[in-house]
Each structure stands twice: as structure tokens, then as C-alpha cells.
Image (tube, grey):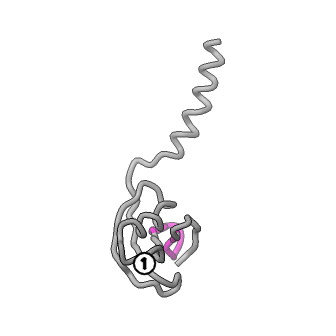
Amino acid sequence: MVFLATLIIAAIIPANAAQTYSEVVSVSCYKGDHESGSYIGDLTVPVPENAGQGCNSMYSDCMGECFGCVSDFDLSEDVCYDSAGRKFLK
């Protein structure tokens, strides 16, 4: 029984550890069109997927029309997320 519990715990811990973030993510917020959105400001979020929701919550001018972008050092473009969490490049 102890052996089985150890196996289960060992299987769970690596999966959860890979999904945690030790630092917050810096986000640039934009309002409007994905191609030419106007810069609103910056904020931090715990995970990149929350960038759009965070921008819309933080800035009242957004009215649900903002998206948040994070720098991706592997790409030449920023990775952006809208308020629904959809991912796109800017």
C-alpha cells in the first residue's frame, strides 16, 4: 500500500511542478485591432494565458476590447492573448 501511494505521489508531483510559475509574467496591454492596437499600459499576471483578462480587468478604458502581449524570446514577435484566452502573434 505504501509503495502504491509513493508511485501515485511521484507521478503527480512532476506534472504539477511543471505547471507552476515561480515568477510573474510582464504584460503589455493594447486596445483595439490586433494589428494596430493602441498601447494602454503594463501589468503582471501569474500565467501568460491570463494576459487579456488581466488587461481588461485592470484598465477601465478597455471595455472588453483589450488584449495582452508577452515577449517570447524564441520568436521575433510577441505572443498575445485576448479576453477569451485565445492566443495569437503580434
The relative height of residue 28 versus residue 11 in the rendered view (above or below) is below
x, y percent for residue 53: 46, 64
Q: Which residue lies furthest to the top in this view?
A: 1
Quadrant in the picture for residue 39? bottom left
For the point 43% across and 80% down, the residue is 31
For the point 51% across and 76% down, the residue is 77
For the point 38% across and 52% down, the residue is 23
Instruction: Residue under label 1, please give it.
Output: 30
Q: How many marks?
A: 1
x, y percent for residue 35: 52, 85
Circle 1 crowding by C-alpha within 10 Å: few under 14, some 14–19, many from 20: many
Task: Residue type at mark 1: give it.
Answer: Tyr
The quarter of the rendered structure image containing the N terminus is: top right
For the point 61% across and 19% down, the residue is 5
The relative height of residue 22 versus residue 82 in the rendered view (above or below) is above
Q: The magenta stretch spans which residues? A: 70-81
SS category of the residue bearing label 1 = strand
The reply to whether the magenta stretch includes residue 80 is yes
Main SS, magenta residues: loop
x, y percent for residue 12: 59, 33
The relative height of residue 16 versus residue 26 in the rendered view (above or below) is above
Q: Residue furthest bottom?
A: 36
The relative height of residue 5 versus residue 80 in the rendered view (above or below) is above
23 or 39: nearer the viewer: 39
81 or 63: nearer the viewer: 63
x, y percent for residue 86: 58, 67
The reply to whether the magenta stretch includes residue 57 is no
